[in-house]
Image: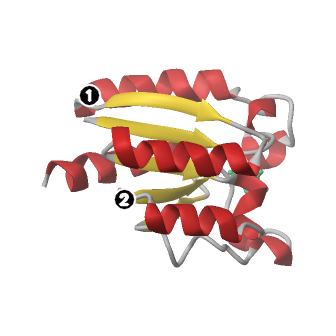
Amino acid sequence: MKILVLNGPNLNMLGRRESEHYGSLTLDHINERLAGVAGELGLELEFAQSNSEGELVSALQRAGESCAGVALNAAAYTHTSVALRDAVLCCGVPVVEVHLSNPAAREGFRHVSYLAGAVAGSIAGFGWRSYALALRWLAEKCAS
Ligand code: DQA
């Protein structure tokens, strides 16, 4: 069972970016840890990151053809993108919204998620473990 772990803008900068919010792990470090979790759960992971909204939309559309589910950290597009919300709604597989930090505890503009009403659920505030928790739910959901 293949799951897409899809990351949005500026998450390629993890490790060099606002460590008080995002910690010190790079995206590669996080993905290595997730590969370990996936091994335990019997999942195959595909990893993708883009700074471009359109590429993220296309990745979600492709995931509907080739994956059983998606763990999506849309980063700043979470708070702005109707296009990504629509892509979540039409991709046809469960999508879990993931955040490293807890946007609800940060600036007001981060309190709105355009994705929250379209995704299966949201996990935020647990650092790289937010992704791991999303994978655990997806493994159970997609196996049932
Ligand atoms: C983020 C939270 C967003 O508000 C922010 O724009 C990001 C990262 C997170 O993982 O905590 O880039 O999605």
- 28 sits to left or right of 32: right
Residue at numbered disc 1 = 40
Q: Position of residue 110 (x, y in %)?
A: 78, 70
Queried on whether the Cβ of the residue with tag 1 lies below 8 angstroms from ligand 1, the answer reads no
Residue at numbered disc 2 = 94
Residues tagged 1 and 2 counted as in contact (Cβ below 8 A): no
Q: Which residue is drawn at 73% across and 76% down?
A: 111
Counting the numbered discs, the total is 2
Residue 16 is drawn in which quadrant?
Answer: top right
Q: Position of residue 130 (x, y in %)?
A: 52, 49
- The image quadrant where one finds the C terminus is bottom left
Q: Which mark is residue 102?
A: none
Q: Position of residue 117 (x, y in %)?
A: 52, 78
Q: What element carries label 2?
A: loop
Judge whether 25 appears above or below 87 on screen. above
| Residue that protrudes farthest toward the left in the picture | 144
Tell me which numbered mark, 1 or 2, is placed earlier along the sequence.
1
Judge whether 82 appears above or below 125 on screen. below
Queried on whether the Cβ of the residue with tag 2 lies below 8 angstroms from ligand 1, the answer reads no
